[in-house]
Image: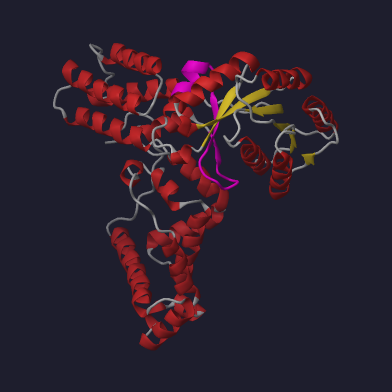
């Protein structure tokens, strides 16, 4: 996600940090490269023009604050402008009824299920209903998603979408539902009959949110269609699907400035849990190659209890962990999600992974090898001789060579941690200040 922008921005700003003196010429060169990067990423032309103009006015001829180098001042200014272009502060989903609209095939129904999962995981009381009577499989699809997520699915015998929506809202009110998610049939903005139907549904239920679900990979085409829906319905936000497959990210950078509404969520995969809240500041950090430490920490907190994490950290940092601890570490990492997405959140790593395919099967093979050991062998690997290695290899469906590699890497990890400990201990990772910073 956003790999193109991350690579181009990092390259342009890296040159600034290497110059001995920050001249107007150096700044203008960096801004030219950033302008080209934004246009290549399919960002709206007027948005790009306004972005570059604003940054130039703030940095050319300006005196940096005493706590920032000239290069850091430019980077901070670019960061602030990116954050503002992306929407400023995160806007939460309002409680009440949310109407999801858009073209057919953009993933509306799946997004309803993903959003229900996200809200339900946060402890919110959620229900879903479908007003899509034009696609026979739509109702069944959402019903199955609701069962999978564990939220109520409202189903009625009505033949009119407006009546279904009205009854769903009434039932949600009676049952104390905090968030009612209403799916609608996909339609073209030029289909007058279907657009009037949406307007009738909106008038009938007076939703707190009207979210347009857009395919991020459609670029500016998606934005133009969203504009047409906005003129008829008054959108309150946008959900961008397939962001994991869009290396450009132009739509994300254009929505707020073009439509005047925020991006509220982004789809980053096919799994039910692959819908994320959209944080402008975190996306700006990713574009600048600063990763997304906040999201990484949140993912860790979701799957790793704090006391368990503290115990594990102590063992790792002192080099006193055994193979059972290593197996537990691998399981924790896998619970946090796809490894390539986790690595992309680490500062400086995202752009480097653009063409790298992370083989997560290796985790399973390592775990299989450790599982094939006896408890005594896991606690004291030194007793594992050749005959034991052969038995472990047979039990795990691997080879003696692979068993040796696991044992070797484990010993190397322990040695490294012990060296750091003898050298004065491993310092705790400090909280990252927003600025000043030297990211490149």
In the rendered structure, the answer to whether residue 342 lies left or right of residue 9 reads: right
Which residue lies at the image location 30% right of the left edge and 30% below the top edge? 9
Question: Is residue 109 among the parts visible in the rendering?
Answer: yes
Which quarter of the figure has residue 151?
top right
Relative to the observer, which residue lies in front, 228 or 334? 228
The image position of residue 123, as x and y in percent, is 69, 41
Which quarter of the figure has residue 86?
top left
Assess whether residue 322 is covered by the magenta stretch. no
Position of 412 relative to 208 (above/below): below
In the rendered structure, the answer to whether residue 226 lies left or right of residue 49 reads: right
The image position of residue 364, as x and y in percent, is 47, 65
Relative to the observer, which residue lies in front, 83 or 353? 353
Position of 436 relative to 346 (above/below): above
Which residue lies at the image location 32% right of the left edge and 59% below the top edge? 421
Position of 103 relative to 362 (above/below): above
In the rendered structure, the answer to whether residue 255 lies left or right of residue 186 reads: left
The image position of residue 395, as x and y in percent, is 48, 80
Which residue lies at the image location 63% right of the left edge and 38% below the top edge? 115
Q: Quadrant of the C terminus?
A: top left
Which quarter of the figure has residue 193?
top right
Q: How many marks do you count on the picture?
A: 0
Question: Is residue 438 among the parts visible in the rendering?
Answer: no
Relative to the observer, which residue lies in front, 322 or 161? 161
Q: Which residues are magenta?
A: 254-277
Which residue lies at the image location 40% right of the left edge and 84% below the top edge? 390
Assess whether residue 268 is covered by the magenta stretch. yes
* Residue furthest left as drawn: 20
């Amino acid at each position: 996600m956003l790999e193109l922008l991350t690579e181009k921005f990092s390259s342009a700003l890296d040159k600034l940090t290497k110059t001995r003196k920050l001249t107007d010429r150096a700044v203008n060169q960096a801004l030219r490269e950033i302008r080209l990067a934004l246009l290549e990423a399919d960002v709206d032309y007027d948005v790009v023009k306004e972005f570059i103009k604003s940054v130039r006015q703030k940095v050319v001829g300006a005196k940096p604050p005493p706590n920032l180098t000239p290069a850091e001042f430019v980077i901070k200014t670019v960061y602030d402008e990116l954050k503002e272009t992306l929407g400023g502060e995160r806007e939460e989903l309002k409680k009440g009824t949310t109407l999801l609209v858009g073209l057919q095939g953009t993933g509306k129904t799946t997004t309803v299920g993903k959003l229900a999962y996200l809200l339900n995981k946060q402890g919110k009381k959620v229900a879903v209903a479908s007003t899509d009577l034009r696609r026979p499989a739509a109702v069944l699809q959402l019903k199955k998603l609701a069962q999978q997520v564990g939220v109520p699915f409202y189903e009625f015998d009505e033949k009119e979408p407006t009546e279904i929506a009205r009854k769903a809202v009434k039932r949600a009110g009676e049952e104390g539902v905090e968030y009612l998610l209403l799916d609608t049939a996909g339609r073209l903005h030029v289909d007058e009959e279907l657009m009037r139907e949406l307007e009738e549904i909106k008038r009938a239920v007076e939703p707190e949110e009207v979210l347009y679900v857009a395919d991020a990979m459609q670029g500016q085409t998606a934005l133009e269609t969203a504009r047409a829906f906005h003129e008829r319905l008054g959108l309150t936000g946008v959900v961008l699907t397939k962001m994991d497959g869009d290396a450009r990210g132009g739509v994300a950078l254009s929505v707020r400035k073009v439509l005047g509404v925020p991006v509220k969520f982004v789809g980053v995969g096919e799994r039910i849990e692959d819908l994320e809240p959209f944080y402008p500041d975190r996306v700006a950090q990713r574009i600048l190659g600063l990763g997304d430490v906040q999201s990484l920490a949140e993912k860790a907190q979701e799957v790793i209890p704090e006391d368990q994490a503290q115990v594990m950290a102590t063992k790792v940092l002192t080099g006193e962990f055994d193979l059972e601890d290593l197996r537990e570490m691998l399981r924790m990492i896998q619970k946090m999600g796809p490894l390539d997405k986790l690595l992309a959140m680490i500062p400086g790593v995202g752009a480097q992974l653009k063409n790298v395919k992370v083989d997560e099967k290796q985790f399973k093979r390592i775990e299989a090898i450790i599982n094939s050991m006896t408890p005594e062998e896991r606690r004291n690997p030194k007793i594992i001789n050749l005959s034991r290695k052969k038995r472990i290899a047979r039990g795990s469906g691997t080879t003696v060579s692979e068993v040796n590699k696991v044992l070797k890497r484990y010993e190397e990890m322990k040695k490294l941690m012990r060296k750091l400990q003898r050298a004065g201990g491993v310092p705790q990772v400090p909280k990252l200040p927003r600025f000043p910073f030297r990211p490149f």
